[in-house]
């Protein structure tokens, strides 16, 4: 499952279309390092995208499709995360193979990553060195929110979550993931499927440590998401939820509450299209001697079951759902 981030579309903004590269076609060449990443102490692996901007007197569109145009040579770049005690965590290279085709090269892309667990209450310095550049960024880990109460009943028109925030968690994104089993009537093969969607996203100003806040949302949107993601198919039967072997119970809806730092908010805000009144608005960056964004997030999750009333509505949708 791919985890989405701020306002759900932000992860796409950061990783799918993260090469917002600016250049002048006939400018003198100047090496510019670009960094895109979100550090998450709850993730098994943390990824950063580190590339270079380029200029060309030829066909820029064709050049953008050549990976070497945007990569630093392997032996000319080192990248470390350094904690407040001076411990250095080396970022190794890895390759993803599922980037969607677009203006820039695909489907393979090089990323930098670490599998070392990041500390929740730390401040990390990103230190990148190339032959000509020393690029740095400072980011404080986001403290997780505390979930005191969260209601999510798809048959209702209103839901709310009562949360405790920390001073560096001003942005909260609530995401729902719905799981179901699908069995082929002919082969009897069963697969677990799911779809996810943003429930709510909210920014809080001047948050005090431990402050309690209310996030409201409309859980009724579950039905629109269901119809968009699950289509009628007489060749299958479906059952709500799946049995989780580790948790030893049936999981139907998993709610994820993600907190983001201010860097993500300001980057997202500056990257939005303006209304024509402001021209050439600079994109926010916290990368010294470079471009891009390095932010932080943390996630808490809980699970919910569909009520009896919600199940009755589910079975009436004509989507081949039956009792588990």
Image (cartoon, rainbow, N blue to C red):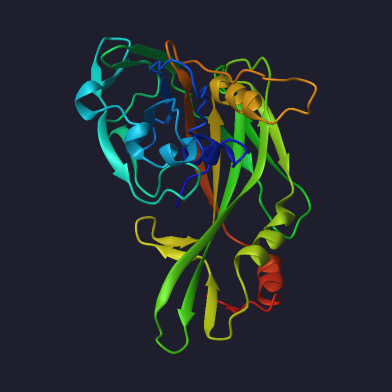
Image spot of residue 49 (x, y percent): 39, 31
Image spot of residue 20 (x, y percent): 52, 31
Q: Looking at the image, is 16 positioned above or below residue 317?
A: above
Q: Quadrant of residue 163?
A: top right
Residue at coordinates 59% horizontally, 42% vertically from top-left?
8
Q: Looking at the image, is 201 positioned above or below residue 166?
A: below
The reply to whether residue 164 is visible in this rendering is no
Q: Quadrant of residue 69?
A: top left
Q: Residue furthest bottom?
A: 186
- Name the side, left or right, on which 270 lies relative to 239: right
Residue at coordinates 62% horizontally, 73% vertically from top-left?
231
- Name the side, left or right, on which 243 lies relative to 11: left
- Name the side, left or right, on which 1 lies relative to 256: left
Residue at coordinates 48% horizontally, 45% vertically from top-left?
3
Image spot of residue 38 (x, y percent): 45, 29
- 88 or 270: nearer the eye? 270
- Name the side, left or right, on which 14 lies relative to 187: right
- 253 or 236: nearer the eye? 236
Q: Quadrant of residue 278?
A: top right
Residue at coordinates 71% horizontally, 52% vertically from top-left?
219
- 48 or 66: nearer the eye? 66
Q: Residue furthest left?
A: 75
The reply to whether residue 287 is visible in this rendering is yes
Image spot of residue 202 (x, y percent): 68, 32
Q: How many marks?
A: 0
- 6 or 272: nearer the eye? 272
């Amino acid at each position: 499952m791919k985890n989405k981030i701020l306002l759900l579309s932000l992860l796409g903004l950061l990783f799918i279309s993260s090469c917002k590269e600016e250049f002048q076609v006939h400018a003198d060449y100047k090496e510019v390092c670009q960094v895109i990443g979100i550090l998450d102490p709850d993730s098994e692996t943390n990824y950063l995208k580190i590339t270079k901007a380029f200029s060309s007197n030829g066909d820029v569109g064709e050049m953008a499709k050549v990976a070497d145009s945007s990569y630093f040579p392997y032996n000319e770049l080192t990248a470390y995360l350094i904690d407040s005690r001076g411990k250095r965590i080396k970022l190794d290279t890895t390759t993803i193979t599922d980037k969607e085709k677009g203006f820039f090269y695909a489907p393979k892309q090089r990323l930098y990553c670490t599998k070392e667990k990041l500390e929740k209450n730390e401040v990390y310095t990103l230190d990148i060195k190339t032959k000509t550049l020393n690029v740095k960024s400072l980011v404080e880990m986001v403290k997780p929110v505390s979930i005191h109460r969260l209601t999510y009943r798809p048959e209702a028109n209103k839901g709310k979550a009562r949360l405790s925030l920390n001073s560096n968690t001003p942005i909260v994104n609530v995401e729902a993931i719905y799981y179901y089993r699908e069995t082929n009537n002919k082969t009897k093969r069963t697969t677990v499927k799911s779809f996810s969607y943003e429930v709510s996203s909210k920014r809080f100003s001047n948050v005090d440590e431990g402050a309690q806040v209310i996030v409201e949302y409309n859980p009724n949107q579950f039905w629109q998401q269901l119809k968009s993601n699950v289509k009628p198919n007489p060749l299958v039967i479906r059952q709500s939820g799946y049995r989780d072997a580790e948790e030893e119970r049936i999981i139907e809806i998993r709610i994820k509450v993600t907190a983001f730092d201010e860097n993500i908010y300001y980057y997202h805000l500056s990257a939005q299209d303006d209304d024509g009144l402001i021209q050439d608005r600079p994109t926010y960056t916290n990368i010294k001697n470079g471009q891009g964004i390095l932010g932080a997030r943390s996630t808490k999750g809980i699970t919910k079951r569909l009520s009896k009333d919600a199940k009755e509505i589910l079975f009436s949708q004509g989507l081949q759902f039956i009792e588990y």
